[in-house]
Image (cartoon, rainbow, N blue to C red):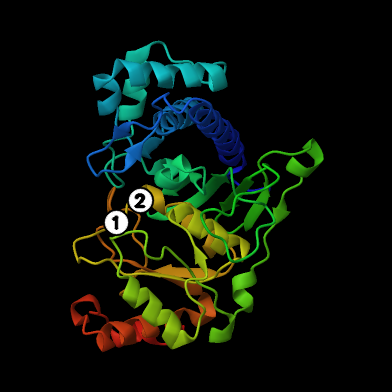
Amino acid sequence: MDSPYRHELEAAIAAAETAAHISREVLAAAQADATAGSFDVVKDDLSPVTVADFAIQALLTRTLGDAFPADGFIGEESADELRQSPKLLSRVLAVLAQCAAANTPFRDADDLCDVIDSCSTLAPGTGPDRIWVFDPIDGTKTFIRHEQYAVNIALLEGKRQVLSVVACPLLSVDVRAPVTDDSVDPTGRGCLLYAVRGYGAYTRPLLGDPGEVLQPRRIPRHAENATSPRDLRSVTCWALLDSGVDVVHKGVAEQLQVPFPGCDLLGWVPRWAVMAVGAANMTVWVYKKRDRYAKIWDHAGAMLLFEEVGGMITDVHGKEIDLAAGRKLEANFGFVAAPKKLHHIVLKAVHDTLKAQGRTNFSRISCRYCQPP
């Protein structure tokens, strides 16, 4: 891809490839020794944290920080657990030394922790105009089960996503619907997706012969071809999380006569990825509580993949997703994503369903958002 962000894209792809290698090595080590304790740390929100989360965030921050020192960085993790656990810290240093020492030198343990912490406090709008956003492992729970997960890298300029690189080490480059968490690529090659705003979305294997890896294929703008609700194909996370209102998501699909759940994935980044490649083209997410907000690293960049194939993404109120609102997307509530020509139909179905189910406190919306573009 020839674009004004060629240097950034090349650096991010190289970092994503190394990050995917780290994730594979950590998985292999954990499977080889079930007592290794790679997955024995728990964060405040009760989601598991792994050696891979810390190692990859450090890798991405140091690599891209060296390449673009004037930019800011946002990542999911802080180094608090590492500072409190010398054993865990030594594992992270060891896997980095094994996988990436030549490219990502860390002077010592304090340097590693400082690098991780350097992107745990910055928020959009409070630092440089250009900010990189990382999710080192999206889908940590499925990662532990050796199921679908992703490494997410985004570059923001102000409120705009301008670059996305997503590595899905267990997703086939030729994946077909329905895709679920246990749809693991039998070839072991995995999938890399990337996009630059206005220049399209591309995909290629993470691993493979040089000719195949060096010749990515541009993903057609398939979402532009969807003109009828019959063309809609859903992706969701059905009955696996307690943050969303499952009956609303199912109700919307039933109103639109869309098979449900269709593709069914825990991680948000894999969901955006399968929408990009055309295995799905619609997702709806209504949180159970009005004060529940999405986290920027689960969506920034990965959403751009779907937009670059003709998709449109808003929140439940029809508002554009504001990526400058903070580490949590507090200016938005939930998600409605669909092909541009059908988005207004899906959005109206969401509000009809909310009204029918008596959830009017979730559907404060101007009627203009439900009209065709």
Task: Give the residue displayed 65% in from the left and 63% down from the top.
Answer: 176
Q: Residues within 10 Å of mark 1 (few under 14, many from 20)?
A: many
Residue 222 position, x and y percent, is 64, 70
Q: Amino acid at mark 1?
A: Leu
The percent position of residue 373, horizontal first and vertical second, equals: 46, 83
Q: Quadrant of residue 255?
A: bottom left
Q: CA distance from mark 1 to mark 2?
A: 6 Å
Crowding near pointer 2: few (<14 within 10 Å), some, many (20+)?
A: many
- Mark 1 / mark 2, whichever is N-terminal: 2
Taking 6 as reference, is 181 left or right?
left
Q: Secondary structure at mark 1?
A: loop
Q: Is residue 351 left or right of residue 276?
A: left
Marks 1 and 2 in Cβ contact (< 8 Å): yes
Viewer-nearest residue: 118 or 265: 265
Q: Secondary structure at mark 2?
A: helix
- Which residue is at the far right? 211
Depicted 41 relative to depicted 89: above or below: below
Q: Is residue 36 above or below residue 326?
A: above
Residue 347 seen by the camera: no
Give the residue displayed 53% in from the left and 59% down from the top. 180
Name the residue located 40 percent from the left edge and 87 percent from the top edge: 371
* Amino acid at dot 2: Ile
Report which residue position mark 2 lands on.
296
In-front residue for pair 51/5: 51
Q: Position of residue 157 (x, y in %)?
A: 42, 48
The picture places residue 57, in percent across and down from the top left corner, at 42, 32
Give the numbered dot on residue 176.
Answer: none
Residue extending furthest top? 107
Would you name the residue on which mark 1 appears? 329
Camera sees residue 225: yes
Q: Nearer the viewer, residue 352 or 342?
A: 352
